[in-house]
Image (cartoon, grey):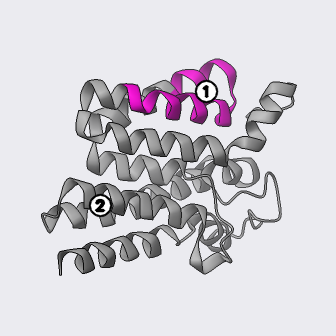
């Protein structure tokens, strides 16, 4: 019964993650659809490129909340830390491979932010600070995301040791999702904001 309950929570996390806020925000504000413009990525950075900071902020908030909500529910229901981590990964996977958008999703950074705030706020806030410092220096969102994700397991080991494995998995997944960005960074052709 406990396994079935954990699977139901993971399914809820995945479905929550599958709601892409970038197209919803752009449609609501009569902005160009993100899957047709800019990087064609349904995330806050691309919405910033095509519609500006306000819509990008709404997208970031929505994508973070859809990760935070199912993990917070799992915590409220007092399931095991392993199940909470699985729900977090399911929500992030939902954003990357959304059931409602033909499995074409984003990179998962904002959803990781939301799940991290629920599970390990100290780790995720330190990662967010690293993201801001890197972005401020180089104005490249993907570089900031890659460096922040890479720092996650180390920070978690220091601040939230039970979640070190989770942040290691998240780092590896985000590296894979940013593989095209890594190539452009190596070539010196990555987009600046």
Which residue is painted at 53% across and 47% down in the image? 109
Look at the image and say whether residue 108 sits in the magenta stretch. no
Q: Residue at x 60, y 72 (%)?
A: 24
| 122 left or right of 91 in image | left
Horizontal side of 1 relative to 147 (left or right) equals left
Mark 1 Cα-neighbour bin, 10 Å: few <14, some 14–19, many ≥20? some
Magenta residue span: 131-154
Question: x, y percentage for residue 144?
Answer: 60, 30
Closer mark to the observer between disc 2 and disc 1: 2
The answer to whether residue 114 is visible is yes
Instruction: Identify the residue under disc 1.
Output: 135
User: Up-down: is 43 above or below 12?
Assistant: above
Residue at image position (37%, 28%) is: 126
134 is within the stretch colored magenta: yes
Instruction: Give the CA separation, mark 2 to mark 1.
Output: 28 Å
- Residue 99, x across and y down, in percent: 58, 78
Q: Quadrant of the N terminus?
A: bottom left
Left/right of residue 64 with respect to residue 43 in the rendered view: left
Label 2: which residue? 71
**Sooner in the amino-acid sequence: mark 2 or mark 1:** 2
Q: Whole-percent x and y of residue 45?
A: 65, 47
């Amino acid at each position: 019964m406990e396994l079935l309950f954990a699977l139901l929570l993971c399914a809820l996390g995945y479905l929550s993650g599958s709601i892409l806020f970038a197209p919803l925000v752009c449609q609501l504000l009569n902005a160009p659809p993100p899957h047709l413009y800019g990087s064609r990525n349904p995330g806050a950075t691309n919405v910033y490129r095509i519609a500006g900071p306000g819509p990008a902020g709404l997208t970031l908030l929505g994508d973070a909340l859809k990760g935070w909500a199912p993990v917070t529910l799992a915590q409220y229901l007092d399931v095991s830390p392993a199940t909470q981590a699985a729900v977090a990964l399911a929500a992030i996977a939902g954003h990357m491979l959304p059931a409602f958008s033909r499995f074409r999703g984003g990179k998962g950074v904002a959803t990781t932010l939301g799940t991290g705030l629920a599970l390990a706020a100290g780790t995720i806030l330190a990662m967010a600070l690293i993201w801001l410092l890197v972005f401020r220096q180089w104005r490249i969102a993907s570089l900031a995301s890659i460096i922040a994700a890479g720092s996650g397991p180390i920070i978690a080991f220091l601040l939230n040791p039970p979640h070190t494995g989770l942040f290691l998995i998240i780092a590896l997944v985000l590296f894979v999702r940013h593989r095209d960005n890594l190539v452009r960074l190596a070539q010196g052709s990555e987009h600046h904001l």
